[in-house]
Image: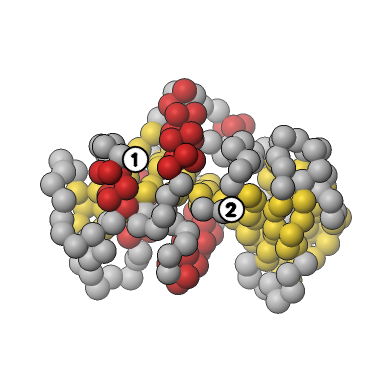
Amino acid sequence: MIDHAKGMQEKLCVIVGASAVVEEDFFFYMDMWKAEDRPLLLIAADAGYRFVREQRIEPDLIVGDFDSLGSVPEHRRIVRHPVQKDETDLLLAVKEAEKEGCTEFAVFGGLGGRPDHSFANIQLLTFLQERGQNGILFGETMHMTVLLNGTLLFPQQFEGLLSVFALSGQAGGVTLQGFKYELKDDVIDRAFPLGVSNEFTGRQGVISVQEGELLVMWQRENQLLPQRP
């Protein structure tokens, strides 16, 4: 999925949340990962079960408090939580996946809908990075990931727009190479949107940050995924 350098045996967790899912993207990537023979765990988080049920897909696990779904579905593996809790349903799904050895995460239905839920799921990407794990949120218009003290490579086939934002304080030692607007060992501040509306150029794009966290988002029409060397 994201980290090809680690080999094919990194277990991938695909989580379906309650927000809108682009069916085309979901099936494209699921087919791609299956063709790669990736070990997969599919989790429906609360009302995300509606999507998999409509598509006649059997998830491996259903997690949530089921307030959004409205009832507890019948399934062989359900982890039910109380409505009053600290974690979101998606975070609970991540924690269940970690128990099964997942280190890579693909989240569909985690963007759009309520803005507070979308922001919570962006925080989920940071939660993963700080634990040495990788995640992507697949949205209706853009996909996004978080980069913490590392490098992200975009193949030359990428087209359209991407944006890069600091998530906390300042991100230092930021380099953007191969894009329309480049930076070298620069600083991006969370209070100034320096990295908004950049463009791919037909060259390999390189984003690196030496100190801090970057939120990186790109147009969903690109069906390839960035790589972490």
Q: Quadrant of residue 7?
A: top right
Q: Which residue is mark 1?
A: 42
Kind of residue sitting beneath label 2: Met
Can the viewer see residue 65?
Answer: no
Does residue 11 sit above or below 75 in this rendering? Answer: above
Residue drawn at 39 percent across, 58 percent down: 19
- Please identify the residue farthest to the bottom as the structure is shown: 191
Q: Which residue is mark 2?
A: 142
**Separation of disc 1 and disc 2 at Cα?**
22 Å
Q: Which of the two residues, 136 or 168, is positioned nearer the viewer here?
A: 136
Where residue 100 sits: x, y (%)?
A: 33, 40
Q: Secondary structure at mark 2?
A: strand
Task: Indicate which disc, 1 or 2, sits on the residue closer to the N terminus.
Answer: 1
Q: Quadrant of residue 167?
A: bottom right
Kind of residue sitting beneath label 1: Leu
Does residue 211 sit above or below 99 in this rendering? Answer: below
Residue drawn at 16 percent across, 43 percent down: 75
Residue drawn at 71 percent across, 52 percent down: 161
Residue drawn at 72 percent across, 42 percent down: 159
Where residue 137 sits: x, y (%)?
A: 51, 52
Does residue 33 sit above or below 194 in this rendering? Answer: above
Left or right, residue 25 beside residue 73: right
Where residue 23 sits: x, y (%)?
A: 43, 42
